[in-house]
Image: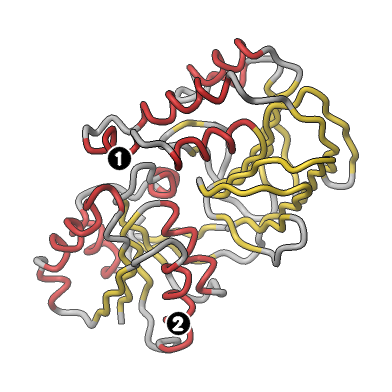
Amino acid sequence: MYIFIINPAAGNGKAKKALTRIKRSSEFKRVDSYCFFTEYPGHAEEIADQVSAQYKCQIEAVIIIGGDGTLYEVMNGLHSTDYPVSFIPAGSGNDFARGCRIEGPPEVIFERIVSGAYKQVYWLGNYQADNIEGRIFVNSIGIGFDAEVAGKVNRSSYKKMLNKLRIGKITYIIALIQTLFTFKPMTLEVVIDGKHRYLQNCWMITMANHPYYGGGMKIIPQAEIQPEKLPVLIIHSISKWKVLSVFLIVFTGHHTRFKEVEIVEAKKVKVKSDSKITYQVDGQTSLCEKCTVTKQDIPFQVLGA
């Protein structure tokens, strides 16, 4: 059975249109399927939890139609890498699809999923913020400036309008400029594979499973889908206006040429602050004082890629 988890609010109705196109295909009519629709934030995680318990032995694949936030919820709800997963992009960012090169019309992606010939392995990341039970991230986790920008994007009144006009990337740019004037650089204790560092005037620390976030920004251009290791980007000891320059060229990946932009690889990263700091996970934001990040060594299978 093919389980669909659809976020009808994603992409201003784009997810519903994608499902309609899939249902018209001959491939959809010949397979067993069940569709679940999310109704509120966190619902996709609840659905995935129920699906994994109820349909455990019958699942051919779990197919998410929505954005990266919906995918994040589903992966945290499944509690297992046993089920093949696919993602039909219908959100505003769609960075997972970009990182896995899932391209084409929804019905074509679905045909590739069912054929079983298009697949790749993918390793997720784990994180624990403060004393909250450990969770999964799919694309990236960021602490500091990028997280505050993501929060401003999520709260913005103009995001929906700009997405309708198909210029959603401008949302991030507006939020970035707004945050630039209010953000205060952090003092952090960072432990990378057991080695302690103290960073002053730190703007952000980001870890990613592939190069993209924020709707196509190549935040860590050399990031690869791989086990064990996480690329870690650190921006510190930099002026406010140079930060703006960094993000003006981040879509090309050339920001890594700045001497204040540092990239290392790690198996385990711990970040600690004396006060609450903002962090983002696959675009969803919260606050913490300490965070531990690792990479999973057991992959799951992505179909349709």
Residue 253 point in image, percent of width and height: 51, 24
Residue holding disc 2: 50
- Number of residue marks: 2
Name above or below for residue 282 compared with residue 161. below
Residue 181 in the image: state x and y as whole percent.
58, 18
Q: Which one is earlier in the sequence, the residue at label 1 or at label 2? A: 2
Residue drawn at 24 percent across, 33 percent down: 166
Quarter of the rendering containing residue 221: top right
Label 2 environment density (alpha carbons within 10 Å; few <14, some 14–19, many ≥20): some
As drawn, 87 above or below 29: above
How much space separates mark 1 and mark 2, taking CA atoms?
A: 30 Å
In the drawing, does residue 272 fall left or right of residue 259?
A: right
Q: What element carries label 2?
A: helix
Q: Residue 39: which disc?
A: none
Q: Quadrant of residue 156?
A: top left
- Give left or right: position of 163 versus 100: left
Q: Which residue is drawn at 83% across and 46% down?
A: 193
User: Please, is residue 228 above or below residue 215 in the view?
Assistant: below
Residue marked by disc 1: 160
With 80 as the anchor, is 129 left or right in this view?
Answer: right
Instruction: Please state if 175 lies on the left or on the right of 37 as rendered.
Output: right
Q: In this view, does 229 lie above or below 213?
A: below
Asked whether 43 or 64 is in front, the reply is 43
**Residue type indicated by callout 1:** Lys
